[in-house]
Image (spheres, coloured by chain):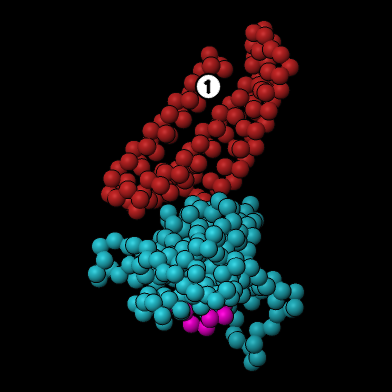
Amino acid sequence: MLQVSVYRFNPETDSAPQMQDYNVDTGGKDLMVLDVLEMIKADYDASVTYRRSCREGVCGSDGLNMNGKNGLACITPLSQAVKNNKLVIRPLPGLPVVRDLVVDMSLFYAQYEKIEPYLQNNTPAPAIERLQTPEDRAKLDGLYECILCACCSTSCPSFWWNPDRFVGPAGLLQAYRFLADSRDQATDERLAKLDDPFSVFRCHGIQNCVNVCPKGLNPTRAIGHIRTMLLNRAA
Amino acid sequence: MVTQVTSFSRNGLSDWLIQRVSSLIMLAYFLFIGFQIANGIDYTSWRALHDTTAMKVFTLLAIGAYVSHAWIGLWTVFTDYLTEYMLGSIGNVVRPVLQIAVVLTLVVYAIWVIQVIWG
C-alpha cells in the first residue's frame, strides 16, 4: 500500500490547510501520480480537488508539487516521485490556493501578459505567411514548446518573493521566444521594458526552473540570452 | 511598496554589470594582498607598498568595488525578504531604514579608507 499525503484546504470551511493521508493500493504498478489522485477521488474521497485535462503532458493543467519537486502529475511515474513508499502531494508553491491542489494562476498569467507574447510586425502582411529561413526557425526550438504549466516559475524563489515584479522563468522564456523571432520587429521596445532591476535581473541563475521543466526546456539559458541582448543594446 | 529608488544605479542591467565587474576587482585585490602576506611582510615593506600611487589607486578601486557590490547585493536581499509581502506593513518601514543604514555604513567605510591611505 502506497502512503499518499494530500494537501487539503477549502477556504470556505477550513481555517487552515492540513495534510490528509490515504493508503492507496497501486497493485504494484508504476502508475502516474495523476492515476493515484484519480484513484483517491474515485475510491476514497470525491472532494479532493485538482486540475487535469489531457493526462499526457500537453495541456499543462496538473502542475503539482510531488515529494518536494514540481512536475506534471500525468507524466510523473511513481517510480520517479515516491520516496520510502511515501508520496506527498502539494499545490504549486508560492501561488494562492483556491482549493486543495488548485492554485490561482493570475499572477503567473499577468507576468506572461506583460511580455506581450505575440508577434509584433508593422509591415503589411504578405499574401502567404511570413517566411523564415530554416536557420531562423531553428532559433525558436527549445522556446516555443513551453505549455505554461507554471512548474518553473513556482519553483523559483525570486518569483516567490517578487511575483508581481520578476517576470519569472516561464515569462522570460517566452520573452526570449519573441526576441529571437526573425519576424518580430519590436525587439528594442521589448528589451526597453526588461532592463529594470526586477523583471529579468532577479534571476540569480540557480536553475530550479531547468531542474523541474517537464518539457526539458532551459529558461536560465534564455534569460542569459536576454541579458546578452540587453548588454549589446546598451553597450 | 518596493521601488528602485534606493537601488545602486536605478537600472537592472547597470547594477548587474557593476556587480560582476566589482567582484573581479575585489578578487584581484584580495589575491594580491594574500600573495603579499604569504610572501612575508614587515612594517617597512607594507608601508612602502601602500605609499605607491598604483597601490593607492588599487585600494581605492577595491573599496569602490566593495561599496557598490555590497550595496547592490544587500539591496537585492532586502527587497526579497524585507517586504510588505513577507513582513506585513512593518516591512515598508524596516526595509528603507536598513537600506539607509547600510548605505551610510558603506559610505563611512569608503571615507575611512580614503583617510587611511591618504591621511
State whether residue B110 appears in this view.
yes
Residue density around tag 1, few if under 14, some if 14–19, many if 20 or more, within 10 Å: some
Chain B rendered in what hue?
red
Answer above or below: position of B2 versus A69: above
Which kind of residue does numbered mark 1 sit on? Val
Identify the chain of the residue marked 1, using the numbered disc in the image: B
Spot occupied by residue B23 in the image (x, y as percentages of width and height) = 61, 38
Residue B98 sits in quarter: top left
Residue drawn at x 32%, y 48% as measured from the top left: B87
Numbered disc total: 1
Residue drawn at x 45%, y 67% as measured from the top left: A4
Answer above or below: position of A131 versus A148: below
Asked if residue B40 lies left or right of residue B12, the reply is: right
The magenta stretch spans residue A53? yes
State whether residue A69 appears in this view.
no
Spot occupied by residue A26 in the image (x, y as percentages of width and height) = 52, 75
Chain A rendered in what hue?
cyan
Spot occupied by residue A164 in the image (x, y as percentages of width and height) = 41, 60
Q: Magenta segment, which residues?
A: A51-57
Residue A216 sits in quarter: bottom right
Residue drawn at x 75%, y 78% as measured from the top left: A134
Residue drawn at x 52%, y 83% as measured from the top left: A54
Answer above or below: position of A11 versus B113: below
Residue that mark 1 sits on: B113
Spot occupied by residue B26 in the image (x, y as percentages of width and height) = 62, 32
Residue A136 sits in quarter: bottom right
Answer above or below: position of B82 versus A36: above
